[in-house]
Image (cartoon, grey):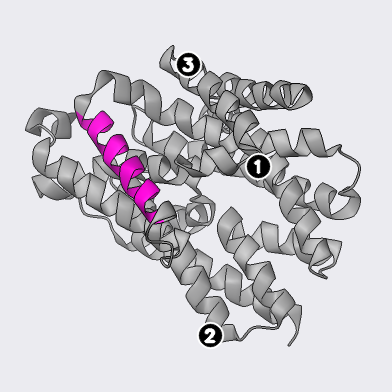
Amino acid sequence: MSVAVYIIVMAGVTYIIRMVPFTFFKKKIKSRFISSFLKYIPYAVLSAMTIPAIFYSTGNIATAAVGTLIAVVLAFFDLPLIVVALSASLAAFITGIFI
Amino acid sequence: MKSNFFRGISHGIPIALGYLSVSFGFGISAVRSGLSVFEASAISATNLTSAGQAAGIDIIAAGGTILEMILVQLTINIRYSLMALSLSQKLDKKFTTPHRLVASYGITDEIFAVCSAQPNMLVPSYMYGMIFIAAVGWILGTFLGASAGQILPESVSSAMGIVLYGMFLAIIIPPAKKQKSVLCAVTIAAALSLIFKYFLTFISSGFAVIICAVVASAVCALLFPVEETEEAEQ
């Protein structure tokens, strides 16, 4: 089968998943439960995606753990996203030199 | 209009930098799976998603069926439906149907996270700025990885793997520190995610994320319903 067919199918399915709720849902949700639910969804999704995956993100649990620790501390003190993200990576890199 | 676009770009720069490193890795593995540099870049340009693309090139390499491709993409990417629904509640009146059709393309985990953390309603130009810079990073990284994957030393490219997760932590920790309800959602989701990873391993990671997020958010919505006044503000 041509690779182009696969790519079109992949792209089409992924687009439809995003587009349908985003485009066709125009009402303001009135239910207090559902609006509360949707408020918590972003944080819950990111938390589930990060833990425990972050500890496997560098291919070495020790370097990833140091990077995670640095990210948690800097995020706790409200540093900007880019500072937290790059410091975590730098910490993992430096740890990697020593082990 | 213009300033919103540039504000979107500036908020999108950390995303673009993270994408540059992640998609670099995707480019390397796509070429290893037998795809050309153009095909790898075309996948990134049309899909703009990490896990779905990684699974997609495995299916292409294995010569899988189209049905398999559809089911895998649905499973891994269905979380975007929840994100799109959540964002749909935060859209400014300027977000007419054509704008929604265009901006749908760019609902990724990271863009969703940054957009939902904004205090104001979202306008199209802001999202376009963010999507534009993020897509540039994602496609450029794929192209570079696919064409010159062996240049970077292993120690650098592996350390770059943590960039996006570091950004996720920077998004969830500050509100979790201030609001007990968010801390509750984050903690339950993380605990469930650990259970899926180490005990319920037969469930795919895409489904696991959905279940964790739905359960954690439903529990917190019952325990800490949003106040009426807070709703009016939003």
Of callouts 1 and 2, which one flags the residue occurring earlier in the amino acid sequence? 1
Q: Disc 1 to disc 2, how far (Cα)?
A: 29 Å
Tell me, yes or no, whether the highlighted magenta stretch contains residue B88. Answer: no
The x, y position of residue B147, in whole percent, is 89, 53
The x, y position of residue B201, in whole percent, is 43, 62
Mark 1 element type: helix
Q: Residues within 10 Å of mark 1 (few under 14, many from 20)?
A: many
Residue B94 occupies which quadrant of the picture? Answer: top left
Look at 53% across and 85% down and name the residue there: B67
Looking at the rendered structure, which numbered label has been put on residue B67? 2
Q: Which residue is mark 1?
A: B19
Mark 2 element type: helix
User: Depth-wise, is mark 3 or mark 2 nearer the camera?
Assistant: 3
At label 1, the amino acid type is Tyr
Q: Name the chain under label 1.
A: B
Q: Height in image: B139 above or below A84?
A: below
Q: Nearer the viewer, residue B175 or B188?
A: B188
Q: Which residues are magenta?
A: B181-196
